Image: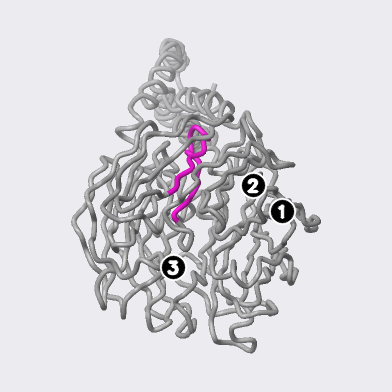
Amino acid sequence: MRQNPKLLKIRIIFGFVTLIFGLLAANLALFHWVERTGLHYLLGDYARYVCAYGGFMAMIFGATLVSNLPNPLKTLKIKRQQTVNEDKKIKEKVTIQKKRKDRKPPITAVSLAFLIFMLFPLIASSLVSYTVSIIMMFESSAFVYYRSNSGANMLFSPKERTWNGSTWSSEAEMPPSGGIVRFIRAAHCPSRIRRDEKIIVTLNEDGYLDAYVWNSSSWLVTNNIGYVGTIANLYRAFDIVYEYSSGNALLAYAVYSTNTSKDLAYKTWDGTQWSAESYIDDPSVFDIQYHWIKLASYPLMVGRVNEIAIIASEEHSNDANAWIWNGSSWGNYLQLEGSVASRATECISVGYEQQSGEAMFIWGWGVGTGYLQSRKWTGTWGSELPQIMIGPNRPRWFTLKADPSSNRIMVASVDQGRDLYTIRWNGSDWARDDIHDDNVDSSTTRCADFEWEPIESNGLLVWGSNMGSLSYKTLTVTSLWSGISTVTAIGIHPWIQLRQNVGDASVKILGSMLNNNYDLGALKWDGSTLTNMGDSAFSSNTTTTDFECFDICFNDAR
């Protein structure tokens, strides 16, 4: 039977495409990338299994088509040489050859599929990594929100810029907040249905919180959504995150109230409206005023979905306390510490291991010598982990970042002696690195930050140390730190912020720095070079360095 050349070409193309897609799908499941691509929204908890088994079957099917190519190609060559009046014996010979060779392709196909699958880490790792990054790039965008004495409303309106993958947009002024902006926190909705939704919350000079919800066409503004008072507003006494599974948001904040049963307040956003204000009661008999609040969302689509962890430090007795949100209420209260190292700075934090889904709570402690103390939540409270001595001074600032590719966690610490340390969690133990710098720009503000790259467990540490430059080090997957490098940057830098970009193959980390000239600048890291995109790329006049008055947010940044 004469084979159509067009059909053979289609078969060749389809075979290679099926093979490649099967290869990608199987390794999305193998390397736990499926939860980060959005496929779980379509396939639910079975996404990884569908990718694994479906991908492997697609590899076998594609390999079957590809491995059978020599036979049809040779058949085509013979048939093209035949004339209309070919000899019948030649036709029979070709037919016999075809039948004999048709026995080999199934065995060859299975062998080829297994060979490619087993050799994948050696021959196709870069291809898959790049392809996954490209897929996520189209799902991701970045925004920066900040205080600036510009626009029609000046300091009374937060400002916004959008990252397009290579540059930041011009400034856009958001609606007025009703007060002079001090702190800003932003979160992006993980729900595929509400993929354009984002929430920005500001804490203002008048002690009120204002919430902005972007519904893909306009800002829905809720002024005075909460009141923390004019003492707690010296600190970031609030936080906003989304439940990773449901796509609902939770706003928690210190509440100014003399009612001893109203120590923390919270509201939820369901995609349509904010709930009424509810409260968390600290078991203490006193009226408690909280200063620093940090939330973290459970990162997986299976297990304890919609869970959120909170750690908060309070003014009355320097306690650090924790609760767990189960999607509808707070519970599992635990006093972590009765005497944190500092109530004026954020020496507390919480984050989840990205593969296990276990939460790590950390806080600073020490009189003279400084320590990092910690405890894990795994669905129940574990025992307090062995404390780690950091250095000769009390820690003042902790920044905790979880590696998306493993259960590793990095903590950057700035202490009252202006020393910069990092402490690493490898999934089972803490280890402190050698001191990075003994004279950073500030101990009263967060002048250092660390961030992981999207894949491969590499990381970047940036800090302010010398007039006219920023210092940085890189961490490799082998857990080795590079030497110190510098990038030119005007002034000294009280505030540094880095955010991981899971959706862009070329720029892995975006950052911002606020200098002592009130300039708010932009940074980018491409995996090898740290670039200052402009010392005042965002604002040339924030009018203050007292507060972290900016926040970078990625579309589904985890």
For badge 3, the amino acid type reads Ser
Element assignment for label 1: loop
Q: CA distance from mark 3 to mark 1?
A: 51 Å
* Residue that extends furthest to the left in the rendered view of this protein: 483
| Residue at position x 77%, y 57% in the image | 277
Front position in the image: 197 or 473: 473
Between disc 3 and disc 1, the foreground one is 1
Q: In the figure, residue 301 lies in which quadrant? A: top right
| Residue at position x 56%, y 60% in the image | 291
Residue with the mark numbered 2: 284
Q: Which mark is residue 166?
A: 3
Ranked by sequence position, the earlier of labels 3 and 1 is: 3
For badge 1, the amino acid type reads Thr
| Residue at position x 50%, y 36% in the image | 21
Q: Residues within 10 Å of mark 3 (few under 14, many from 20)?
A: few
Magenta includes 435? no
Q: CA distance from mark 2 to mark 1?
A: 8 Å
Q: Residues within 10 Å of mark 1 (few under 14, many from 20)?
A: some
Q: CA distance from mark 2 to mark 3?
A: 51 Å
Ranked by sequence position, the earlier of labels 2 and 1 is: 1
Q: Which residues are magenta?
A: 347-363
* Residue 5 visible in the displayed image: no
Front position in the image: 43 or 475: 475
Q: Residues within 10 Å of mark 2 (few under 14, many from 20)?
A: few
Front position in the image: 243 or 75: 243
